[in-house]
Amino acid sequence: MASFSIPLTGLEADSTALNTVANDLANMNTTAFKAQTTSFSDLFYQQIGSTGAGDPIQVGAGVKVASNETSYTQGSINSTGNSTDVALNGSGFFVVSHNGNGAYEYTRAGNFTQDANGNIVTAAGLSVMGYPVVNGVVNTNAPLVPINIPVGQVQEPLATTSFSMTANLDSASAAATQFPAQVTVYDSLGEPHVATVTYTQTAANTWSYSVALPAADFASGVSTPITGTMVFDSNGNLTTVTPTGGAAGTVGTAGGDVSSIALNFNGIADASSNLAMQWNLLGPNGKPTISQVDTASAVSSTTQNGYPSGQYQSFSIGADGTVTVTYSNGQLQNVGQLALANVTNLQGLQLLGDGNYATTLASGTASIGTSGAAGLATLQDGALEASNVNISSEFSNLIIAQRAFEANAKSVTTFDTVTQDTINMVH
């Protein structure tokens, strides 16, 4: 009987609405949870006649759930201070996988942890996928791989191959005045060596240089300095370098000019490889880093590209998703970049639980890229996206659904009373 079937459709639809509200409220503290809203539509109609004007007389058959739409609006971002927590600020999803292959799922819940192998995983244990690093550079053209943190690993040392020194030599110095400067360099085993550069004024606008390591740093116990001469023009600019036993060279960037001095030290005591370095004489702007003006001799900075071995200490995730590891030697090393994804039709995604989603024919294939590309979100390390459930709206929806359920239930009891009265009339 339609008198009962129609309100029963209402009870079923209202029950779905109540369940949706209850689920939203239950997950109001779930990381990156997205609230849902139930929408209704009327069912088919039966024509039972027509009016004198020929207009059809139609009677409805009830209601059905038309959709349960998910709101993908941004949740608030709360700082946690935990390096494994990442929040998405904008559109998109993290790419995750059960076994690290192409069967991807997607999530906005960035409450990640590390497994026993150092892989970054979701709270449910899925691997967080990203782009690998090749020769220290992220390769966004390579297939996605699980992001791995080298916990407990030792970074190998890097021998110094170049160094530079920004210094001024006092043009008012008396003849034979010496000015020593030092820079710490590293051999192939990561052992530090203090290289002393001694400048000695030999004539007007002319200084000799001597670069030496301590005698104890050599297996022979003998240190042989590398020497030469530097000449400055009347404005204090370094113009010519003449290594001992070599030809004079103009300092500059033109063809045939000298931009560095080769320094080779052999027979290091710790049996490391020979220390072969270039003393760079030019700065990034192409100008010499050694000058001679009338002010006290001083070194303002030194740089070199070597470092000792280091133990893993921590990692961080940048706004572009780059995962950077910090070692005890102060070195930073990129180990990957988190991949992000998005789909054309968000409502077409299949909800899997645990904050995960899967693509469907309705959603379309996910497009995968990096933070900031193609409208994808930026990332915030040490933070999490909160649920976007609005408790005030949910309570309002709860009252509306409750009243609708009560009204449909009342219709059932009313029709039951009418039916009972009809039966009583027969008797």
Image: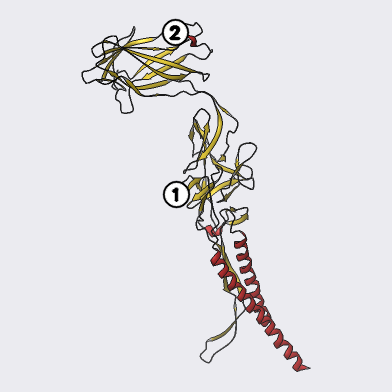
Q: Residue at x 51, y 23 (%)?
A: 308
Q: Which residue is mark 1?
A: 374
Within the image, what quadrant is residue 169 found in?
A: top left
Residue 101 visible within the image: no
Seen at 53% across and 92% down, the residue is 52
- Residue at disc 2, secondary structure: loop
Q: Name the residue type under label 2.
A: Ser
Circle on res. 223: 2
Between 236 and 98, the one nearer to me in the picture: 236
Give percent across and percent down for residue 385. 53, 52
**Which disc number belongs to residue 347?**
none
Q: Is residue 321 visible?
A: yes
Q: Position of residue 25 (x, y in %)?
A: 60, 62
**Quadrant placement of the N terminus:** bottom right
Tell me if 301 is positioned left or right of 292 in this view: right
Q: How many marks?
A: 2
Q: CA distance from mark 2 to mark 1?
A: 59 Å
